[in-house]
Amino acid sequence: MANIDRAATAASSAIRRTLERLRSLAAISALITLVVGAATFATGWWVFHGTTSWLVIGGVLCAAPVVAAAIAWVLVRATVRLSDQLLPDVRTLMGQSTEASSMFIDYDSGQALGMQARSFRQLRSEVTTRKAQLPALYVCTRAITSVPGLAAMAIIGTVVMGGFGTILLLVGLFR
C-alpha cells in the first residue's frame, strides 16, 4: 500500500508539472497567435481597402489559429484548477489493477511514467471508460493529450498567417 501511495504521489506530481508546462505553452501560443492574427488582419484590411470579402475571408483565415490557441489555453487553465483532486483518482486507479499501475510506474527502474508521452494515450483510453469514477484524472489526461495538438495547429497557422501577412505588407508597400 505504501508503494502505491508513493507511486500515486509521484505520478500525480508529474502530471501536474506537465499541466503547468502546457499552460505556459498554451498561454504563449495564444498571445503570439493573437498578435500575428491581428497584424495580418489589419494589413489585409489596409491592402484590400476594407472590403467585405476581406472581412469574411481574412477574418476566418486570421481567426482559426487564434481560436485553436484560445481553446487550448482555456482547456488547460480549467484543468489545472482540477489537478488538486488528481491524487485520489490516481490512487483509486492504481489500487484497482496491476495493469493500471503499470501505466504509472516502470517496475524495472522504479521511475514514475507521468512525464512519458507514450503512457498518456494508453492512460487516456483506460480512464475514458471510467470517467464518471475518475473525473479529475480523465480531465487531466484529456488536456495532456489534446492541448499539444491544438497548440501545434495554432503555431503552424500562425506561421502561415504571418507569411501571408508579410506578403500582403510587401504588396501594399510596393503598389
Image (tube, rainbow, N blue to C red):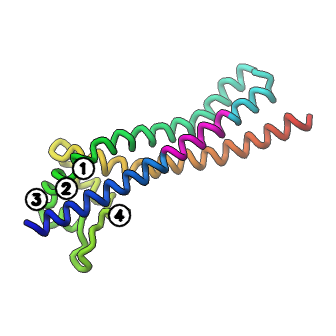
Badge 1 element: helix
Report the residue that reaches farthest toward the bottom: 108
Please name the residue that numbered disc 4 is placed on: 115
In the picture as drawn, the residue positioned furthest to the right comes out as 175
Tell me the CA gap for discs 4 and 1: 15 Å
Identify the residue position indicated by label 3 in the image.
96
Q: Earlier in the sequence, mark 3 or mark 4?
A: 3
Q: Amino acid at mark 1?
A: Leu
Question: From this viewpoint, which residue is outermost toward the left?
Answer: 1
- How many dots with numbers? 4
Gap in angstroms between the C-alphas marked 2 and 1: 7 Å
Q: Secondary structure at mark 4?
A: loop
Q: Position of residue 121 (x, y in %)?
A: 33, 58
Q: Which residue is mark 2?
A: 90
Disc 3 packing (10 Å; few <14; some 14–19; many ≥20): few
Relative side of 10 to 153, left or right:
left
In the image, 89 versus 150, the foreground residue is 89
Q: Evaluate if marks 2 and 1 touch, with contact meaning CB atoms under 8 Å apart.
A: yes
Please identify the dominant SS of the magenta region: helix
- Whole-angstrom CA distance, mark 4 to mark 2, is 15 Å
Characterize the local packing of mark 1: few (<14), some (14-19) or many (20 or more) Cα atoms within 10 angstroms. many
